[in-house]
Amino acid sequence: MAHALDLVRADLAERGGRSLVAAHCFAAGVDATPGVEREIRQGGLDVVPLAAFDGPDYVALGHIHGRQQLSERVRYAGAPLHYSFGEAGKPRGSWLVDLGAEGLSSVRWLDLPVPRALVTVKGRLDDLLTDDRYDAETEHWVRAEYTDPTPQPDPMRRLQARFPFCATVVHQPAETRPDDGDGYARRVRAARDDAEIIDAFLAHVREGEGATAAERDLIRDVLDARTVAEARA
């Protein structure tokens, strides 16, 4: 990168005139969106010093998804659309740059419309599915975080019935128990039969909630059927 800019500066010194540089990189001082922009290197350099861009009248940078101004003449316009929920609410648009006879004259931001906003909704699954306060989010791209103590059946299908553009569902219990791997192992060792082993497993993965009465009946039926099948084999 530095060598390329040296060539640009040498050409400017020889020929003069206005100059604009476009580059794809991480520049020093940039605020990246965690987990969105990939690591990028020029040679062995992962961050380009801002001083490397001295000389040209304007530097238009790419790779960072969000609008950023590193100096009056070094800027990122960002991506035209939102590509992750971490970018929700950030403006989308472009810089309109006017280069006059003497170089940079003005820079003005032009907003682009966001056809479908990104939102995150959070609450118990039943509340997300029924509460009126989420009515305004039904036409947005939705990341749903449901806080029930235990995983719920088929949450994506159920949420998409209300939020057609639900793209991500995450189970984030409002309260979580400390890791009890030791206790789980003890319960498995102490179990008297397969039904108790299954109950210990369910309690381990469902924040302490073991099998319900209906689930215990189903587990017993399945285990009895397996015993009969093995006896007939």
Image (tube, rainbow, N blue to C red):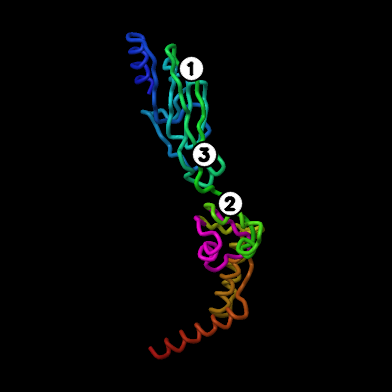
Res. 33 mark? 3
Secondary structure at badge 2 equals strand
Secondary structure at badge 3 equals loop
Which is nearer the eye, 43 or 52?
A: 52
Front disc: 1 or 2: 1
Residue drawn at x 42%, y 30% as measured from the top left: 25
Q: Which amino acid does label 3 sit on?
A: Thr
Find the magenta span and give its range. 142-167
Instruction: Tell me if residue 214 comes above or below residue 232 in the rendering.
Output: above
**Which residue matches tag 2?**
120
Point out the tag, 3 or 2, that comes first from the N-terminus.
3
Residue drawn at x 55%, y 80% as measured from the top left: 193
**Which residue matches tag 1?**
105
**Residue 198 percent location from the top left of the image:** 55, 74
Res. 211 mark? none
Left or right: where 32 falls relative to 122: left
Cβ–Cβ under 8 Å for marks 3 and 2: no
**Residue 26 percent location from the top left of the image:** 45, 30
Which is nearer the eye, 112 or 191?
A: 112
Instruction: Tell me if residue 1 comes above or below residue 13 in the rendering.
Output: below
Q: Mark 1 and mark 2: span between their CA atoms?
A: 41 Å
- In the rendered image, which quarter contains the C terminus? bottom left
Indicate yes or no whether the magenta region holds residue 159.
Answer: yes
Q: Which amino acid does label 2 sit on?
A: Thr
